[in-house]
Amino acid sequence: MELLEPDILLQLLIGGLLAGALYALLACGLNLIFGVMRVINLTHAELMLIGAFGSYVLYTAFGIHPLISLFLIVPVMFVAGYYFQLVLVERVVERPMLDSLLATYGVSIILVNIGLLIFTADFKSVPVLQGSFAIDDIPISEPRAVAGLISVALTVGVYLFLERTRLGKAVRAVSEHAQVASICGIDVRRIRMLTFGLASAMAAAAGVMLSVIYSFWPGSGIDFIQKCFAIIIIGGMGNFVGALYGGILLGVVESFVGAFVSTQWGEAMAYVLLVAVLLIRPTGLKGVARA
Amino acid sequence: MKNRLLLSALLSFLITFIVAPVASFAQDIVVGASVALTGKYARTGQEQLQGFQMWVDDVNARGGLLGRKVALKYYDDESKPETGAKLYEKLITDDKVDLLIGPYSSDVTMAASTVAEKYNFPMVSSGASATQIWERGYKNIFGLYTLAENYMVQILDFAKSKGLKKIALIYENTEFPRAIASGVKSKAKQLGMNVVFEEEYGKASTDFSSMIIKMKTKKPDMVIGGSYLPDSVAFMRQAKENRLYAKIFAFAVGPALPDFGKNLGLDADGVMGNTMFESTLKRPGVKEFAEKYKAKYGHEPGYHAAGGYGAGQVLEDAVKKAGSLDRDKLRAALFSLDTTTTFGRFKVDATGRQIGKRGYAVQWINGNRELILPADVATAKPVYPFKDWNKR
C-alpha cells in the first residue's frame, strides 16, 4: 500500500501538526476563559472571524500582508476583548451558566449578521502565501507552515506568560480559586478582563492565519467552534495545556484518518475522540475532577 | 447539534424578519420561493434570488401577468433541505402564494418538491439537476438545468480525445454531486476510461489535504470534482500546496463563477468547469440581460442568476399559455411548453425533467473565464494540459 511509505506518513504527520497548532491556538483561548471565569464563550469563533475579515479588509483595501496585519489586529482585539469583558461578560460571570451562554450566544448572532450585512455571504480569502516549499521532496504548504509556526509561537508565549510571570500566576490563581485569589489581594475583575483580552487576541490571530489557509464567510464560525468544544473536552475543560494537546491530537488524527479511511471520517474524529475520552477519562487528558 | 439547531433557528428568525424584507400586496400575483441566503449555497442562492427579482421587475414593467402585478415572497432556507421543506409548506398553506419557484441545489429541491407534490402545486425548479428528483413519479416539479449526469460529458469526451485514461473523482455527499459522479462513472466506462480514485466528502469539508495526498499515490490523469464553489476553491488551493499534478482539473460548480478567479487568483488558470449560461452566448436577450444585471448588482451574472431569471420567464410563458393561475391548467401548460428564455431552451419530458437545455464547459484562461466547449459557441480554444504548479 503506497500510503505506508515514510514520505507520505511524514507528510500526513506534518499536515496534521500544522492544522493542530491552529486548532490549539483557538481552543487554548476558549479554555483559558472557561478556566478563569467558568464562562463558555460562544462568540469565540466570531472573534476569530473578526481577525480573518480584518486581515481580508487590510489586504484588499491597503494591500497589507496578513503577517503584518497580525501586529495590528492582535493588539486591537486584545483591547476589544478587554472592554468586551468589562461591558458585557463581567455582568454574567458568577451567575448561572445559562446566563453567560445566552449572552455570548446573543453577541455571536449579532456579529454573524453584521458580518453578513457588511461582507454578504460570499466566500472570501486572502490570496497570499499560496503554494508550498519542499524539504526532501516532501511538499509543505506555505500558508499552513507559517500559520502553524505562528500559532505555536503564540500559544507557547501565552503559556510562558501564565507560568513565568507574576501576572500569569495571578491568572492561574483566579482559575484555581477565584475567592481565595481575591482574598490574597488579586484584582479578580481585572484578571478576568485581561484573560478575555488575551483569549480574544489569540482567537483573532487564529483568524488571520485562517484567512490565508481557507475561504471563509461570516457563518464559518460554527465549523470551528464545534471542533473547539470537542478539543477542550478532550484536553480537559479549563486547562490551557490540555487544549494544546487536544488541538494537536485532533489535527494529527484528522490527517491520518482522512488519508487512511476518508475525509468524511476524518471530520467525524473530533466527536469520536470526544466520546472515547468521555468514556475512558471523563476529565479529559489534562483535566482534574472538580468538586 | 442542539446548539447548531438553536443557532439556525435564531439566525433564520433574524434573516427572515430583519435582513430580508418581504413584499406582498393584495391583488398581486405572489410568487413564492425559498432561497439559500446563508449556509453553503449562499453565494449561488443570492445570485438566483437577484435573477428572480430582476424578472419580477421586468415582468411588471411589461404590464404584469394576466393584467396583475407580480410580487415575490421569499424566505432563507439556510441551504438546508429540512428548512426548505418547511418554508414551502408555509408558502403554500400560510402565505397562499399563487405560483412557486424551486429553491437552489438538488438536495433542497428534493425535499421541497415533495411538499409541492403533496399540495399538487406545480413548481418550476430553477436550481436543481439531479436526476433522482424526477425519478419519483412526481407530477409537479419542472427542471430548468441540464441533468447533472450530463454535466461532465463534454469534458470527458475532450479528455478521451487527448488519450487520458485515469480519472480521480471526488464529490460532496449530496444529491447533485452524487448525480454528477454517477454520470462521470457511466460515461468513463463507455469511453474505456478508469476511475482510479473515488471519494465522497461531507458538506462542510474545507480540508482536502489528506485526500489529495492519498490521490497523488494513484497518479490520476485528470481530476473531476462534483463540487460547489467553496469546496472547489479549497481543493485547488490545497492541490497546489500539496503539488498534485494532473492534465485536467474540472469542477461542476465553482469555475463558472467569477468568485472562483477572485479567490484563487492566477491559480485558477487552466481549471475547467461546467456552466448553463454565459453572458457571451449569442442568443436574443442574453446581452441585454447581462448588461442590465451588471448595472443593477455591480457584477456580471453567473448562470445561477440567469437560471433564476429564466425560471421566472418559464412561469410567465406557462401562465400566459394556461391563461389562468389554475394549478391543473398551469401544469398542463408546463408539460407542453417549448420555449427559449434568456437562460436557454425549456422543454421537459413526461416526468418534468429537462431535456431541451444545453450545457457548456468553461475554462479559466489568463485570468478570464472562457467558453471552450462545445466548439460552435466557444470563445477560446481549450488550453491543454494543465500547467504544472512549479512552471507557473
Image (cartoon, helix red, strand yellow):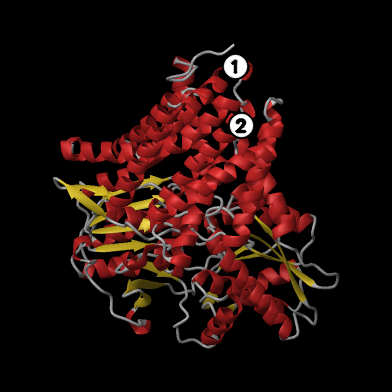
| Residue highlighted by disc 2 | A190
**Residue at 42% across, 69% down:** B256
Which quarter of the rendered picture does the N terminus of chain B lie within?
top right
Location of residue B289 with respect to B216 vertically, above or below: below
| Residue highlighted by disc 1 | A184
Q: Mark 1 and mark 2 in contact? Answer it, CB < 8 Å.
A: no
> Which badge, 1 or 2, is on the more N-terminal residue?
1
Amino acid at circle 2: Arg
Disc sitting over residue A283 in the figure: none
Q: Is residue B37 visible?
A: no
Q: Toward the viewer: B202 or B112? A: B202
Location of residue B23 with respect to A99 vertically, above or below: below
The crowding category of the residue bearing disc 1, from other C-alpha atoms within 10 Å (few below 14, some 14 to 19, many at least 20), is few
Q: Position of residue B35 (x, y in %)?
A: 63, 60
Q: Is residue B308 left or right of residue A20?
A: right
Q: Is residue A247 left or right of residue B216?
A: right
Q: Position of residue B284 (x, y in %)?
A: 53, 88
